[in-house]
Amino acid sequence: MEIQGRIKMIDETKTYGNNGFRKREIVITTEEQYPQHIMVEFVQDKTDLLNSYQVGQMVKVSINLRGREWTNPQGEVKYFNSIQGWRIENLENAQQDNSNMPPVPPMEAFEPADDLQEEDHDDLPF
């Protein structure tokens, strides 16, 4: 899955526990009628992907939806979702790179056949 939008916030990399688990969060604001502020987390070595990005850039982020189950000390089962990013692309450079390409000519329209007879059929086996 992918989401597109403008970077609203990039957090610092945070390290958790003795095993050195790393996580970095980014907020993407979609550009649609009702903009959404979507927090995406990048973990472990993927945190470094965000180093070359800044607030305000238009990006496309490839994501995976993650869900997990947790039982609290009282025995209640809780469910948590997260959005994990694994790739990020700068859309502003892609648009600028395409600006030097020649325009694509429009496809030619065609008129539908009006002399088709129902009894005319082809003998294709599919």
Image (cartoon, grey):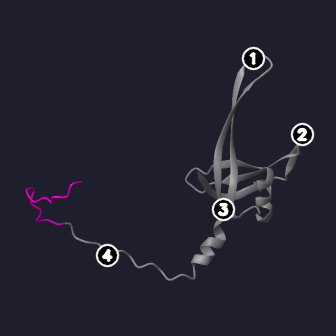
- Badge number at residue 9: none
Occupied quadrant, residue 29? bottom right
Instruction: Find numbered disc 3 in the image and state the secondary structure of the residue it sits on.
Output: strand
The local secondary structure at tag 1 comes to loop
Q: Which of the two discs, 4 and 1, labels the residue nearer the N terminus? A: 1
Amino acid type at mark 1: Gly
**Identity of the residue drawn at 78% across and 16% down:** 74
- In the image, is residue 90 part of the stretch drawn in magenta? no
**Could you tell me which residue is drawn at 12 percent across and 62 percent down?**
116
Few, some or many C-alpha atoms within 10 Å of disc 2 (few <14, some 14-19, many ≥20)? Answer: few
Q: Which residues are magenta?
A: 113-126
Q: Which residue is mark 2?
A: 17
Query: Do the numbered discs 4 and 1 sit on residues whose CB atoms are within 8 Å?
Result: no
Q: Earlier in the sequence, mark 2 or mark 4?
A: 2
- What is the three-letter code of the residue carrying label 2? Gly
Q: Which residue is mark 1?
A: 75
Residue named by callout 3 = 59
Which residue type does callout 4 highlight?
Answer: Glu
- Whether residue 26 can be seen here: yes
